[in-house]
Image (tube, rainbow, N blue to C red):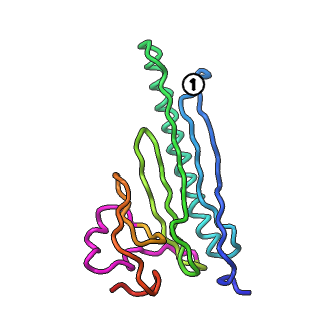
Amino acid sequence: MSISEIPLTLQSRQWERTGTWEEWPVLTCSISLPEVCTPGRGARRINRYYRRVDAVLRRWLARRYHACCRRAQQALAASRPLPSECVLVTWEAAYQDARLLSLVWTLEAEGQRRQFADLWTWPDGLPADVRTLLPRDLLHQARRGTLCLAEDGIWLLGAHGRRRLAPLPENGPGAPPV
């Protein structure tokens, strides 16, 4: 059986932490990123990318923690309630077939939500550009946000939610755009 015939399996790599200042929780983190469990070079490439994302998130959270500690000190000095911040990172497989994998991950912090979409070729695990699947007349809209390939079409992810731009081509997402 070749690697391209092995079904692609995904699982979550999760960790949670609570940062405290003077025994008060000031920053709570819940991080979940995808991990490809199927063996092969493509899985190693994709997993290496998400390990790097995890490392960047950890550095960013270290800075957030220090900022939260400063805010807690200021609040205590001003006799205000101690603030607490929560950071949540989740992911979902938006589309998956024998040749493509689309993953969307969401970062929620400070009352804001930001979505990121990654499209991968399978089994080689190389990044792909979802804009190549769009009809030409919709390409200008692709500059306004993050594009995501999903089971029911191509979506634009923005600050105010998702908006469907185009259906999938009838021959599947690998078919040339009309």
Q: Which residues are magenta?
A: 125-147
Residue at figure coordinates x 43%, y 55% from the top left: 115
- The N terminus - image quarter: bottom right
Point 25% across, 78% down: residue:
137
In this rendering, the count of numbered labels is 1
Identified at 59% across, 20% down, the residue is 22
Left or right of 57? Residue 112 is left
Taking the spot 46% from the left edge, 63% from the top edge, the residue there is 117
Who is closer to the viewer here, 61 or 142?
A: 142
Question: Of helix, strand and loop, which one carries label 1?
Answer: strand
Is residue 128 part of the magenta span, yes or no? Answer: yes
Kindly indicate the quadrant of the structure image that contains residue 27: top right
Please provide percent x and percent y for residue 110. 43, 38
Q: Quadrant of residue 133?
A: bottom left
Vertical relation: 81 (above or below) 52: above
Q: Which residue is mark 1?
A: 21
In the picture shown, does residue 1 fall above or below 83? below
The image shows residue 23 at horizontal and vertical percentages of: 62, 22
User: In the image shown, does 42 or 119 lie closer to the viewer?
Assistant: 119
Relative placement, left or right, of 79 versus 2 is: left
